[in-house]
Image (cartoon, grey):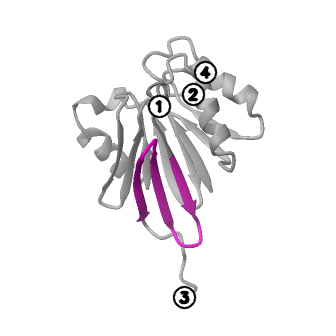
């Protein structure tokens, strides 16, 4: 499964639209907040895509949650903006949050800077600000348990094997 990950559009739905057209095979879109009107535009333009979004600190009048979690391809994923977890001051709080809730992947925004890293067996990802041209792609393989994270425009993080989604038949 291919997932496009955006955050912090701040009025720039056009950049999201360009990335979606470039990566047409992406089935799912995650949006980490700060551009509620923009992601609603994307929902309208691409009704065939599954779109999941959260509220950011600048999304004052929107009625979506600050945290959304979902399980896809055997991976437990959290989507949040990050401002409530102090991500501008480091990853300790968000990492503890993710580990305490058993997430395999925690996706957040707020800093406008790309970041992809592994903490133990958990992937932390910030796609950066799409308004600045940054976004990421997650590719999940349920059979192998492999998660491939790619940062755009130019930093390929590479494949990461998290807790395997493959169950033994014993």
Instruction: Give the SS element for disc 3.
Output: loop
Indicate whether 95 appears above or below 169: above
The Cα–Cα distance between marks 3 and 2, rounded to whole angstroms, is: 48 Å
The image quarter containing residue 115 is top left
Asked if the residues shown at circle 3 and circle 1 are in contact, with their CB atoms under 8 angstroms apart, the answer is no
Indicate whether 86 appears above or below 107: above
Mark 1 Cα shell of 10 Å, populated few (<14), some (14-19), many (≥20): some
The Cα–Cα distance between marks 1 and 4, rounded to whole angstroms, is: 15 Å
Indicate the quadrant containing the N terminus: top left, top right, bottom left or bottom right.
bottom right
Upstream in sequence: badge 3 or badge 2:
2
Instruction: Give the SS element for disc 4.
Output: helix
Q: Find disc 3 in the rendering and name its residue.
A: 170
In the image, which residues are magenta? 137-161
Q: Residue at x 55, y 56 (%)?
A: 139
Give the number of the disc on residue 38: 4
The image quarter containing residue 4 is top right
Indicate whether 91 appears above or below 168: above
Mark 2 Cα shell of 10 Å, populated few (<14), some (14-19), many (≥20): some
Asked if the residues shown at circle 1 and circle 2 are in contact, with their CB atoms under 8 angstroms apart, the answer is yes
Upstream in sequence: badge 3 or badge 4:
4
Q: Find disc 1 in the rendering and name its residue.
A: 133
Q: Is label 3 or label 1 in front?
A: 1
Upstream in sequence: badge 1 or badge 4:
4
The Cα–Cα distance between marks 3 and 1, rounded to whole angstroms, is: 47 Å
- Provide residue 150's location: percent of width, then percent of height: 46, 51
Is 144 in the magenta?
Answer: yes
Mark 4 Cα shell of 10 Å, populated few (<14), some (14-19), many (≥20): many
Indicate the quadrant containing the C terminus: top left, top right, bottom left or bottom right.
bottom right
Q: Residue at x 59, y 72 (%)?
A: 143
Asked if the residues shown at circle 3 and circle 4 are in contact, with their CB atoms under 8 angstroms apart, the answer is no
Q: Find disc 2 in the rendering and name its residue.
A: 15
């Amino acid at each position: 499964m291919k997932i496009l990950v955006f955050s912090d559009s701040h009025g720039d739905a056009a950049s999201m639209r360009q990335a979606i057209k470039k990566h047409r095979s992406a089935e799912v879109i995650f949006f980490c907040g700060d551009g509620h009107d923009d992601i609603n535009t994307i929902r309208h333009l691409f009704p065939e895509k599954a779109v999941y979004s959260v509220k950011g600190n600048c999304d004052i009048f929107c009625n979506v949650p600050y945290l959304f979690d979902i399980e896809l391809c055997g991976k437990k994923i959290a989507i949040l903006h990050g401002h409530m977890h102090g991500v501008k001051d480091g990853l300790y709080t968000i990492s503890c949050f993710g580990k305490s809730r058993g997430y395999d992947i925690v996706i957040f925004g707020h800093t406008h800077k790309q970041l992809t890293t592994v903490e133990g067996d958990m992937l932390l990802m910030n796609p950066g600000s799409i308004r600045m041209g940054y976004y990421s792609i997650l590719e999940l393989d349920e059979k192998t348990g492999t998660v491939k994270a790619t940062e755009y425009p130019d930093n390929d993080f590479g494949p990461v094997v998290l807790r395997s989604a493959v169950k033994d038949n014993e």
